[in-house]
Image (cartoon, grey):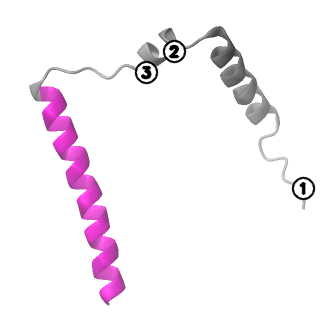
Amino acid sequence: MTMWIWAGGCIVFLLAMGYLADRIALRREIEFNPEDGIKNATDAERIYVENYLNETKNNNNNIPL
């Protein structure tokens, strides 16, 4: 029973932190746009991420048994 209370408390804490972050962002009029992160990336970082995503797409569900 104690473990369920602890796990529930962790979940409620994480939800409360997310709610608080949303309220602060709305109050300060902060917009989170995923496109902004790629603007500051170097060419090497872009190539690395694109290569990783391509490899992940090609190797999806190819788990050796």
Category of crowding for the residue at label 2, using alpha-carbon neighbours closer than 10 angstroms: few (below 14), some (14–19), many (at least 20): few
**Residue at which label 1 appears:** 64
Q: Is residue 16 left or right of residue 58?
A: left
Part of the protein shown in magenta = 2-26
Among numbered discs 1 and 2, the one appearing first in the sequence = 2
Magenta span dominant secondary structure: helix
> Residue 30 location, x and y as percent?
21, 21
Q: Residue furthest right?
A: 65
Among numbered discs 1 and 3, the one appearing first in the sequence = 3
Residue 64 part of the magenta segment: no
Question: Label 3 to label 2, Cα distance in Å?
Answer: 8 Å
Task: Please name the residue shown 31% across and 63% down the image.
Answer: 11
Q: Marks 2 and 3: in contact by CB < 8 Å?
A: yes
Q: Secondary structure at mark 1?
A: loop
Tell me which amino acid carries mark 1: Pro
Category of crowding for the residue at label 3, using alpha-carbon neighbours closer than 10 angstroms: few (below 14), some (14–19), many (at least 20): few
Tell me which amino acid carries mark 3: Pro
**Residue at which label 2 appears:** 38
Quarter of the image where the N terminus is located: bottom left
Against 28, residue 12 (above or below) is: below
Question: Label 1 to label 2, Cα distance in Å?
Answer: 34 Å
Mark whose residue sits in front, 1 or 2: 2
**Residue at which label 3 appears:** 34
- Could you say which quadrant of the image residue 35 lies in? top left
